[in-house]
Image (cartoon, rainbow, N blue to C red):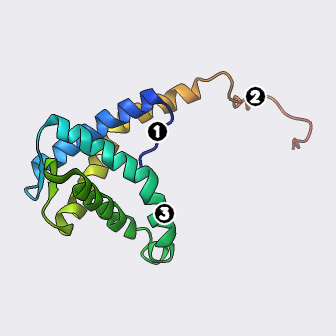
Amino acid sequence: MQITYASSSGFVARTIVLTLATMLAALLLPGIEVNGLWAAIGTAIVIAVLDNIVRPILIVVTLPVTVLSLGLFLFIINAIIIEMADGLLGRSFEVDNFGWALLFSILLTLFNYLLELPNRRRQTYQNNEDPSLPQQDDDHFDDYEEVE
């Protein structure tokens, strides 16, 4: 669920994606309640802020457990972030218990990945067409290459 923002336009785009993911996950899970579009936007912003500030601290503190669990403990950290957002937002965003927070964080991660997929493909394609990147040219030999 890690969310990073490089620019203000990136922040807006990712907030929209996270808002859509929040609304979709809340529709599918009966233990999650989001009261309207503005609540979903607020939830997305709070989760993004907590994800960028609190999550790195939690990862460092729980690093041994995360390594021993082969990274699965990150789902618990994501659920803790969701529970913190629930506590901060009050009645506009409610999570019934930790189990629903865990399922919500898994769905949120999945939806966020799926909604970002077209953007990632476009960025990969644009990076391959970037003239400032070194081009692969296998048609010539360098001085250090041996020819047999």
Image spot of residue 69 (x, y percent)? 42, 75
Q: Disc 3 and disc 2: Cα gap in Å? A: 49 Å
Q: Which residue is mark 3?
A: 57
Say which quarter of the image contains residue 79. bottom left
Q: Which residue is mark 1?
A: 5
Q: Residue at x 21, y 68 (%)?
A: 98
Q: Residue at x 46, y 78 (%)?
A: 68
Residue 87 at least partly seen: yes
Helix, strand, or loop for circle 2? loop
Instruction: Tell me the crowding category of disc 2: few under 14, some 14 to 19, or many 20 or more residues within 10 angstroms, Cα based.
Output: few
Q: Is residue 83 left or right of residue 95?
A: right
Q: Is residue 51 left or right of residue 102?
A: right
Residue 106 at least partly seen: no
Q: Which residue is mark 2?
A: 139
Q: Residue at x 41, y 46 (%)?
A: 3
Image spot of residue 137 (x, y percent)? 73, 29
What's the amino acid at mark 2? Asp
